[in-house]
Amino acid sequence: RLGPATGAARQLGEVVQALLVMARASNRVRWRNFAASDLATAAVGRRIVVDASPLAGVGVLRGDPDLIAVAILNLVDNAERHGARTAVIRAGTRGGQQFVDIEDDGPGIAPERLDRVERALRRYEESGELDESLGLGLTLASSVARAHGGVLRLQRGGTRNSGLCVRLMWPTASTEQGPGSPSRQPPAPAAGA
């Protein structure tokens, strides 16, 4: 009887943490420079194997590393919940944008469901309209992206040709435009990027 109660308490704690992060993300982002490798500890202790070694050679990113780390944690938890055994975290900069990719080896999302989730993400990014198809993890990660003036994008397969790659992308400089600005529609993650 203790096992289910412990699991329920852990899940409730994660929901409360997610709600607090979403509330903080709706306020001001604490912009600062940080080493991408600092994000490697975001998913330590999870129940799937996480390879954050690609972060070592990235250098400096700019944003709120605490919010970004919580988004990573939730995306890794999502990957585990949906059947992934491993995940890789990558980061980088390209064309005035920064990104963090979380790519897993799970079953991925069926194309018709992926289309529905992507439409829900865009509605949330543009107007803040919530949709149950996103779930708490994607909603939280998208909130972090919006707070940074960025977006969240999904791609089936990624570089592994299986699973899902979720990209959190935001501008290299802090922005005064509101979250989810329609002028920020970066492309989905490219294989090997």
Image (tube, rainbow, N blue to C red):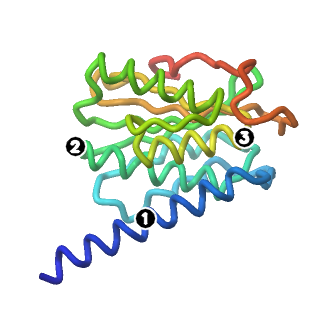
Classed neighbour count for the residue bearing mark 2: other residues with Cα under 10 Å, few (<14), some (14–19), many (≥20): some
Residue 75: x %, y % from top left: 43, 46
- Where, quadrant-wise, is the N terminus in this rendering? bottom left
Residue 109: x %, y % from top left: 29, 27
Query: Picture quarter containing residue 162?
Result: top left
60 or 141: nearer the viewer: 141
Where disc 1 sits, the SS reads helix
The extreme right residue here reads 176
Query: Picture quarter containing residue 93?
Result: top right
Compared to residue 146, the image places residue 137 above or below, namely below
Classed neighbour count for the residue bearing mark 1: other residues with Cα under 10 Å, few (<14), some (14–19), many (≥20): some
Residue at 65%, 19% (x, y): give it: 185
Compared to residue 166, the image places residue 84 above or below, namely below
Question: What is the three-letter code of the residue carrying label 1?
Answer: Glu
Q: Which residue is mark 2?
A: 83
For marks 3 and 2 on the same chain, the one whose residue lies earlier in the sequence: 2
For marks 2 and 1 on the same chain, the one whose residue lies earlier in the sequence: 1
48 displayed left or right of 168: left
- Label at residue 14: 1
- Label at residue 148: 3
Residue 6: x %, y % from top left: 26, 77
